[in-house]
Image (tube, rainbow, N blue to C red):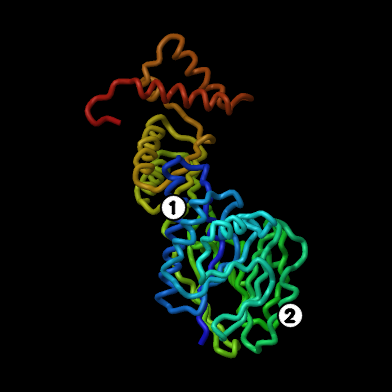
Amino acid sequence: MITILHTADWQIGRVFSQFEPDDAAALSEARFAAVERLARLASEHDVDAVLVAGDVFDAQTVTEKTIRRLFNAMAAFEGPWLMIPGNHDAALTESVWTQAQRLNVIPDQVRVCLDRTPVTVAGKFTVLPAPLTQRHTYTDLTEGFDTAGRDEGLPRVGLAHGYVQGILSSDIDATNPIAAGRAEQAGLAYMALGDWHGTKRVDDKTWYAGTPETDRFKNNDSGQALLIRLSDAGAAVTVTPVHVGRYRWQFLERELAVASDVEALVAELASFGADDVLQVRITGTCSLAGHRLLSDALGTTKAKARAVVWDSTRLRLQLTEEDVQALHADGFVGEVLQELRAAQGGEASELARDALMALATVLDAQRPRTGNTP
């Protein structure tokens, strides 16, 4: 039996600029922790090798400290690691890989495949690497798998990074193409792919592992690695997804119309905790009281969740007469408030909406509170 841990798209060094600095730092740190968990998994399952299908690093410009930390994170598994460059860390003449070589930090058990030379692992199977030597290619680098590595007479495993033609959605970048059916055509025991950040079956012997730590708001079954078991002859393959990641990235889009919509959203936000990364997009209308509830809920959720991206730019404030009276907006300020209310339906509605929201929020914050009244 041959056992392999298939992973990809670590994106070490990724900068999460859409989040606040402390949240961005925690999300970047989580990527190192995911590699540490992968190493422990490999050791626990006594795998024959870990195959990393590209995009180990997020960019060529990561720091020396980041490179050193990455290889330190792999220490718990002393068996073979085979990794290839992807489009983010392509094997250019001068790259993150040449920097790692100069630093002399690549452990002996780690094989970085910078060319397409087949690699035999423990006399049990042969890995056929297809590393990217530039960010974008327009030819299929796996074409040579049909004949490569046959001399040993061992099961052969492809290791590539790119886009399987006709499989992923049409809006995916179609550079770095890989022919559908390559594993069957080349007689491979398994094809380990990277580039798509979610776990995805292409066919029985061809899979994307996805990133081990989720990094975007897509429901694509990410945050996993794949435990692969092959018969010694390579005829049978069993693929078992294994959860690795910590953070749950979740996207909420809600349209508000009545008070109960606001209350439902507030209750929903209260259910999230420290391992949640949220993107919340709100449209529709709400009263001043509803806006106050949402603002309080946002503050509470930001304190509980790992990170929150909040977009309420398309939320329209629908002031009631009670809201206007409560704001005590007299004189010129009151006139402006009423004009902005009326202008929300005109040509400058977006500007009026934003101005009304800002003015009403300031006035509401200044009005006296009594007891626990919201």
Q: Secondary structure at mark 2?
A: helix
Q: Looking at this view, name the residue that lies furthest to the right.
A: 139
On the image, the x and y values in percent for residue 96 come to 60, 55
x, y percentage for residue 256?
47, 41
Q: Earlier in the sequence, mark 2 or mark 1?
A: 1
Residue linked to disc 1 = 29
- Nearer-the-camera pick, 135 or 60: 60
Q: Nearer the viewer, residue 213 or 307?
A: 213
Q: Is residue 212 above or below residue 24?
A: below
Where residue 282 appears, as percent x and y from the top left, is: 49, 41
The percent coordinates of residue 304 (x first, y second) are 34, 46
Where disc 1 sits, the SS reads helix
Number of the label disc, if any, that sits on residue 310: none
Which quadrant does the C terminus fall into?
top left
At x 53% / y 64%, what residue is drawn?
106
Distance from Cα at disc 2 to Cα at disc 1: 40 Å
Q: Along the line of sight, which residue is nearer the eye, 83 or 277? A: 83
- Residue lying at the far top of the rendered structure: 331
98 vs 166, left or right, is left
What residue is rendered at 52% in x and 42% in y?
18
Q: Which residue is mark 2?
A: 146
Residues under numbered marks 2 and 1 in contact, where contact means CB atoms less than 8 Å apart = no
Indicate the amino acid at tag 1: Glu
